[in-house]
Image (cartoon, rainbow, N blue to C red):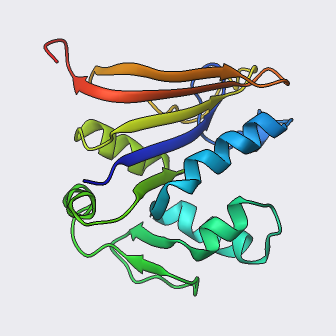
Amino acid sequence: MRKIVVYELLSLDGVAEAPDSFFTDWDDAMGANLAAVIATQDAVVLGRRSYAEWAQFWPGSRIQPFAAFINGVTKYVATSTPLDQDWANATALDGGLVECVRELRQQPGGDVGVHASISVAQALLAAGVVDELRLVIAPRTAGRGRRLLDGLPPIQLEPIRSALSPTGYLLVDYRVVGQGAAS
């Protein structure tokens, strides 16, 4: 069974929206961490907004290793309308997000990543479909913006790994082991 892996860039106060405003440095440890995350993924689920923004930016980007990865990987887009931009290997999910991701999980292949799409990550976390959270936490607060874990039921996490990058970013990986107090 494939794993569903959420990778998010967060501020210290949990904001995931507009990470460019609180991610000012990118060091080799962070790059190696990202490379390790995407090395196991052969599919990505994106929300409609992330897809629209990324389809304009990543096809012409030279930021590696992510550009080669995201441009070549199969991309499933959570949307109820047809995709209006041409981006290689992108397709709209046929049906509900959670049901489609559960089906993807049962198919053979590598991990399925969720990158940058806050509402997709939240929906999958709330439904108990996420296997791992891979977070990069900036040593800055954002104050305002959408927070990844807002509005979710209690989720029990088991630490897999943690490291501190040379520029002070916390790299943490968690296994999702259950939801609610009884999990």
Can residue 151 be seen here? The reply is: no
Q: Which of 39/154 is in front?
A: 39
Residue in the image at 32% along x and 72% along y? 93
Q: Is residue 32 left or right of residue 16?
A: right
x and y percentages locating residue 2 in the rendered image? 31, 54
Q: Which of 117/167 is in front?
A: 167
x and y percentages locating residue 102 in the rendered image? 21, 56
Residue in the image at 33% along x and 29% along y? 176
* Quarter containing the C terminus: top left
In which quarter of the view is residue 82 placed?
Answer: bottom left
x and y percentages locating residue 173 in the rendered image? 51, 29
Q: Is residue 53 left or right of residue 109?
A: right
Residue in the image at 81% along x and 61% along y? 63
Can residue 36 be seen here? The reply is: yes
User: Which residue is at the far left?
Assistant: 182
Residue in the image at 56% along x and 61% along y? 50
In which quarter of the view is residue 5 placed?
Answer: top left
x and y percentages locating residue 117 in the rendered image? 50, 52
**In the displayed structure, would residue 20 be above or below residue 165?**
below
